[in-house]
Amino acid sequence: MINVLLSGVCGKMGKNVVACLDNDKDAKIVCGVDIADEYCSFPVYHSFDDVTSIPDVIIDFSNVVVLDKLLKFAISNKVPAVLAVTGYDEKQIATIKKASKLIPIFFTANMSLGVNLLCSLVKKAAAVLADDFDIEIIEKQHNQKLDSPSGTAIMLANSVNDIFNDRFTYEYDRHSKRAKRTQSEIGIHSVRGGTIVGEHDVIFAGRDEVITLSHSATSKEVFAIGAIKAAKFIFDKEPGLYDMNDILNLK
């Protein structure tokens, strides 16, 4: 049985993870970290500084501000970590990469298996179409999401740029400049409204034809399931930086 520490246990995603692990035969939550005071059937600490029990793996669905204390705890106790938070800045990402030399870290912009498969399909499509097709990304999220564009939209754009040596620039806001679209850009557009869980469309627009690759999540449970898969995958791995491609064997 894999013992899990769940960071952000009282949040929406945390509660989804709790529900998904309720009857799991391979993993269970032994403690949580959260600033909220909600009843749980296991100990919940307000900070990683207060945690007294050592888990087999950490799943983090909290906030980017928790990163430093989480990594300090994980490194000190040699605990693998699944980082499921979005919105890290470049400095924090560099910190994550540095920490992965000491402990196993699972880090991806989206925990959905389907989104990560979509990235692989986008790469294949771009390799064939990019010279003759314009690439645009539209992402839709609920009205409470803080970061824009979504980490997933950036991940999809990066999946194209990775195979073209960063030849594309990202255009986030067309109204600010009056100019024709160039072939060396990827347009990224954000929609925020209602309770949309997450929708992403990658559009390849060519001469007289359009190809669209899409993913739509209808509940947050898909991200919880992905994080649990990641935890089961990483808990016995060597130090390093892992992502969903390692699970899906897409590398």
Image (cartoon, grey):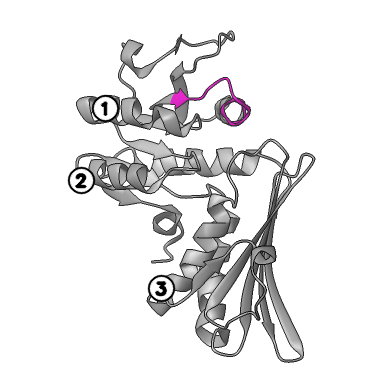
Residue at mark 1:
72
Residue 53 higher or lower than 149, as above or below: above
**How far apart are the two marked residues, 2 and 3, measured between alpha carbons?**
26 Å
Q: Say few, some or many: other residues with alpha carbon within 10 Å of mark 3 (under 14 / 14 to 19 / 20 or more).
A: few
Measured from the top left, where is residue 167 in percent x and y? 43, 78
- Looking at numbered disc 2 in the image, what kind of residue is underneath it? Lys
Mark toward the start of the polypeptide (1 vs 3)? 1
Residue 242 seen in this snapshot: yes
Q: Is residue 100 left or right of residue 64?
A: left
Residue 163, by quadrant, is: bottom left
Q: Secondary structure at mark 1?
A: helix
Q: Residue at x 75, y 44 (%)?
A: 196
Residue at mark 3:
166
Q: Secondary structure at mark 2?
A: loop
Quadrant the C terminus occupies: bottom left
Measured from the top left, where is residue 146 in percent x and y? 61, 38
